[in-house]
Each structure stands twice: as structure tokens, then as C-alpha cells.
Amino acid sequence: MQDRRNEVSRDGSDRAFSVEFLDPGAGVVEVRLGGKLAFADAASLWTDLCTHLTPAISGDVRFDLSAIESIDGGAMALLVQVKWNLQTAGVRCEFVGGAGTVQTILDLYEGEAAPTPRPPHVPVGVFAMIGNQAAAGLREIQLGLAFIGSMVLAFAGVLRRPHSGNWHSVAPIMNRTGADAVPIVLLINFLVGFAMAFQAAVQLKQFGANIYVADLVGLSITRELGPLMTAIIVCGRSGAAFAAELGTMKVSEEIDALRTLGFGPLRFLVFPRMLALIFVMPVLTLLADLAGVTGGVLVGTINLDLTLTGYIQQTQRAVAAWDVFQGVVKSGVFGFAIALISCHQGLSAAGGAEGVGHRTTAAVVTSLLTIIIIDAGFTLLFFELHL
Amino acid sequence: MTALITVTDLTMGWSDHDLLERQSFEVNRGEVFAILGRSGCGKSTLLRYLTGLDEAKSGTVTIDGIGPPSLEAGRPAFGVMFQSGALFGSMTVGENLALALAEWTDLPPKAVAAIVRAKLRLVGLQGSEYKHPSELSGGMRKRAAIARALTLEPSLIFLDEPSAGLDPVSAAELDQLILTLNNALGLTVVLATHDLDSIFMIATRCILLDRETKSIIARGDPRSLRDGSVVPAVHQFFSRTTKDAK
Ligand SMILES: Nc1ncnc2c1ncn2[C@@H]1O[C@H](COP(=O)(O)OP(=O)(O)OP(=O)(O)O)[C@@H](O)[C@H]1O
Ligand SMILES: [Mg+2]
């Protein structure tokens, strides 16, 4: 700082370097640089050079570096760029007088300073965009179907040679996706049952039909909300986890390494996850049904003056075994779909951490969408079959 | 000498650019074969094709007369070490090594453990079997990955930059290990590298890939290429000089 203040350049400003533009005749402009050219002063160096050395300059330009005491890489890069700009505009330029380290740094930086052409940005029209998106969507569906196909083959392979299945991973995965999810499944379904009963109670009280709260809660929990809420929870917990796990393995070449050791990722990684969810979802759903009905019981006994036995008997009358069973079957299918989609998304990850994030998001969104579609399909199916 | 790996008219690359166009070469049984080239020229990519992880756009790769190499079709015929190591992060080092042993052999757990320990000793990692890969240094991970590639006693092994990131002593020990395995067991080694010392020390033959011409610009014994080649790019590579150096 100190020597910078003391050294005042010939053009009167307060900086550590000097630039002089001389005209020694013979159609040559001489740019005499001196002092300490540091990156810190680069901005003013750049402005100086650019204002004096426009392409409209007449004659050749000679940069005299002999008076430079020191120069750093950043400052040199700017000099080289200025020279290159002039040259491309048709002005002949040269660096002269560089000695010692100045010349070394010049050699290091001198070269083609042409800006790299940006890859041409082809404007995409609205229709092209829609088309591209549709094509990408179709491609995803195609890949998804291909994945289901290979999964079927992998399943068949495991059935043919049971010992080739990765069975010992199933229990730990069931533990992570099932047992660990029990508290949150119980809590959420209890609250859903509770809230639903509360809302219904307000209406039913007006007609003195308090007892029908049991029917309403029992049926909607077992047929619809129990399986659905459970699937949503499992999708958010385990679906996201599957996609992130497999995605990370994919981008860090672990999947490739597995393949070179003779393990198919479908058989080794996807199969146990799928099996685990297919087993775990029905169990979680049964617990969800219990928790939901318990929520209803609480509202019924506290808020509607129903007796515990009365409520339970009414629930038994309203809810048939089939109602519970269809919810449980549905949940098994949900588990299958969540595992399939999440693992497929994980295995499709590419391009580092961002790719994994992208695929994890896609796994959750696609799973949720698929669950809702499957649910609607089941509802229609059972309705048509009068079940 | 008979050819173990035959590559015929291989064109390889990524979606947007080709790295090699219609190139052929052979790897003989029992040799240490080096794939050389400057960073980004496609050494790792070529290994993906040789090991069957990627399928060639055109051309064929056969190993032992069978091709393309099929993965996941039973006990693997060769070992592979990835440039990144690619150890399974969720397992301990020991489990990484034991995985394929448990799958493809009938050895009881104690015997598996013994082999795992022996392989780790081979690469100087004794006592690390209960560590997770994240608890190892970069060079240790590399060595663990080499040990993993050796667990099934393959007769062919692919190594992607085995000595990169190793200290000089470990690198020399690794060269020695490769030479010993090659001499004593007839192990065929295909390695991608740019470690010149190691190349001259262990490689019997090599190919030099070039990105500009998308071709193999030199092949043969690395020592004679170093001393005899007049092609500038080849000379630069082997004499470790830059373009402008005289
Ligand atoms: N997944 C990928 N997608 C697209 N291009 C890729 C991908 N992986 C590598 N490439 C490109 O392929 C080229 C060769 O890469 P490769 O990893 O084979 O080089 P390499 O010779 O092994 O280099 P190094 O010595 O640095 O390891 C590079 O230009 C790289 O940009
Ligand atoms: Mg590489």
C-alpha cells in the first residue's frame, strides 16, 4: 500500500504503474509500460489501454515492456487480450523489451486469446418445446416399460435359481422401510381418523345420527385413506431413500463395479427392495386402519357421548372383512409401484449430485402420481364389480 | 503368444463426440498391456468397452474368443479396478472384498475372511477390513479396489490408473506386485495409465491413443517407442516434453 501511494506515475494519477502513449514516428504508436503491474490495478490499466488503443488507431502498436519492474498473471492476461483484440482488427502489434521474469510470464500467457465461441443457442419454439417434452416423456415411459420387462426377467431368474436372489438384504430393508415407519404411520393415520370423525360429528350431531360416525370413519379409513396415507408416507420415506441410494451408487460407478463382479443390479439391489415393500405395505396398512379407527373412537367417546363398546360394535357391523382386505391388497400394489419407480429413477441417475437430486424428486412425484392413478383404478374396478 | 482380447474396428465415444474411430488391436495372453494417452483421450472409456460395460457403436470386442464380454452371466471372467475405486460405500472394506467370494465360491465364512485378509496384505492394507471406504485415504482406497479386483483370482485384470495418487514407494510396490502376479501366475494385465516410470518398468506392450486423430498413434514396446519414435506426439508423450520443446 505504502509504495503505491508514494509512486506517482507520469500521467499524474496515484498508482504503481505507468502507461505512456508515445509517437516516435514512422507510423508507430509506442505504449511504454512501467512500474509494478499488479492485478489490483488491472481495472485502471484495462480502461487506459482500451481508451487509447482503439482499432481506429493509425499505424502499428509496439508495447514496450522494458520498464516494467514486475507484472503478475492477471495483468499480463489483459495485455495479451488487448494485443489480440487489436490484431484481429487488423492493427499490427508486438511486445518488445520484455526481460527476465516479465518475458517468462509473457511466454506463459501469450497465445490465441480468441474468445471461445459459445455453443450456438438454437431458439426453441413453443411447439418444438412441447414436442421435445412429449418425446422425452414418451422416452421415459418407454424406458420405464423396458425396466419393468427386465425386472420381470430378473424375478424369473430368481425363481428359477432361488439362491441367486439377494435374500439376506430383504430383512434389513424391511426393518428400515417398515418397522422404522410404524410411529409416523400410526400418528398420521390416528390424526386423520380423529379429524375426519370430528368433521363428521359436527354434521351428524344435527340429525342425531352420532353413531354413524363409526361407519364413516371405519369405511373410509379401511377402504381408502389407510392404504393411501400409508403409501404416501412410504413413498416420501422409502421411495426417496431408494432413489437417492441407487442414484448415488450409479453416479459413483458402484453399479458398474457391481456388474463387473457378476451382480446384476436388478437382482441384487432392486429385487430385495421390491420384495420388502410388497411385504411391508400391507402390514403398515393394517396398523394404519387400527390407528385411524382409534382416532374415531376417541372423538366418538369424548365428543359424541358414545360408549366404547357401542362404537366398536357399530364399526364391526359397518366394515366387512372384504373392506379391510381390498385395502390391504391395494397397498401391496402400491408398494410394488413405489419400489419399481424409485429404483428405476435411481438407476437412471447421471451427472453427479444434481442428477441424484433430480431423480429423487422425480421418484417421489412419479410414485405419488402413480399411486393416485392406481387407487382411482381400483376404486372404479371394485365399483364395477359391485364389491 | 495367443491373443486373449481382440478388438476389431472399434468405434467408441459418447453421444456427442467420438473418441476412437475404427481401431483394432489385440492383447496377448500373459502380457502387461498399457493403454496410454493424454488426459481425456478416452482410456477409461476404452476400458468400459473392453469390460463390456458399454456396447460398441460399431466394431467388436472379444475376450477369449467370446464377445462382447457379458457381465452378470455367472462368475466374472476378469477383475476390474475403476479409476475412482468405486468401493461400495455402505460396506466395510472387508465386505467389499468378500462380496464376490461369498457369491461365486462355496468357501465357508472363515475361509472367505482368510482370503480377504490375504488380499489386503498383498496391497499393504492389513488391518483395514473393518473400516469403511470413507475412512481410508485416497491411495488406500485405490489399493483396496485393486485387492477387490483380485479376489476371484481372475486370469485377466483391468486397472484404471492404478498408481495415480500413490506415493512413490507404494507405486513401486504396486508395480512389483503386478510384475510378480504376471510372472508367477501368468496374470494378463490391461492398465490405463500415464505414469511413465511404471510403464517402462512393467508394460510389455502398449498403445497410445490420440484424441485429435481419434486413433491409435503408436503401438509396441514402450521402451523402443521412447527411443525410436519420430512422430512428435509420441515423442512428446514418452519424453515428457511439451509441444514447443526441442
Ligand atoms: N459420462 C460421460 N458423458 C459424456 N462424455 C464423457 C463421459 N465420461 C467421459 N466423457 C468424455 O470422454 C472423454 C474421455 O474420457 P475418459 O474418462 O475416457 O478419459 P481418460 O483418457 O480416462 O482421461 P484421464 O487420464 O484423465 O482419466 C473426455 O473428453 C470426457 O469429457
Ligand atoms: Mg481415466
Image: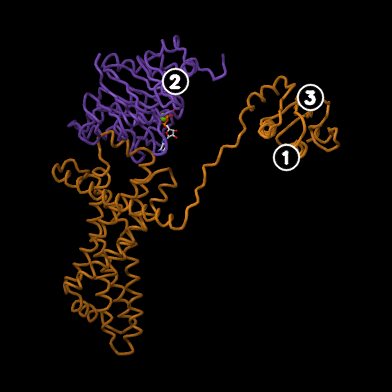
Q: Amino acid at mark 1?
A: Ala
Q: What's the chain of the residue with tag 3?
A: A
Tell me where residue A22 appears, x and y as whole percent: 83, 29
Q: Residues within 10 Å of mark 3 (few under 14, many from 20)?
A: some
Measured as percent of width and height from the top left, residue A272 is found at 24, 48
Tell me what hue chain B is rendered in.
purple
Q: Which residue is mark 1?
A: A43
Q: Nearer the viewer, residue B57 or B164?
A: B57
Which of disc 1 and disc 3 is earlier in sequence?
1
| Residue B236 rendering spot, x and y as whole percentages | 50, 17
Q: Using the image, name the chain to which the residue with label 1 belongs.
A: A
Label for residue B195?
2
Task: Indicate the chain coloured orange by its letter.
Answer: A
User: What residue do we see at 34% from left, 85% from top?
Assistant: A203
**Ligand 1 quadrant assignment:** top left
Which of the 4 image quarters holds residue B200?
top left
| Residue under label 3 | A67
**Does dot 2 land on a helix, a strand or a loop?**
loop
Task: Give a yes or no on whether discs 3 and 2 share a subunit.
Answer: no
The residue sitting at 79% across, 29% down in the picture is A29
**Residue farthest along the left direction in this orientation:** A160
B109 relative to A108, above or below: below
Q: Quadrant of the N terminus of chain B?
A: top left
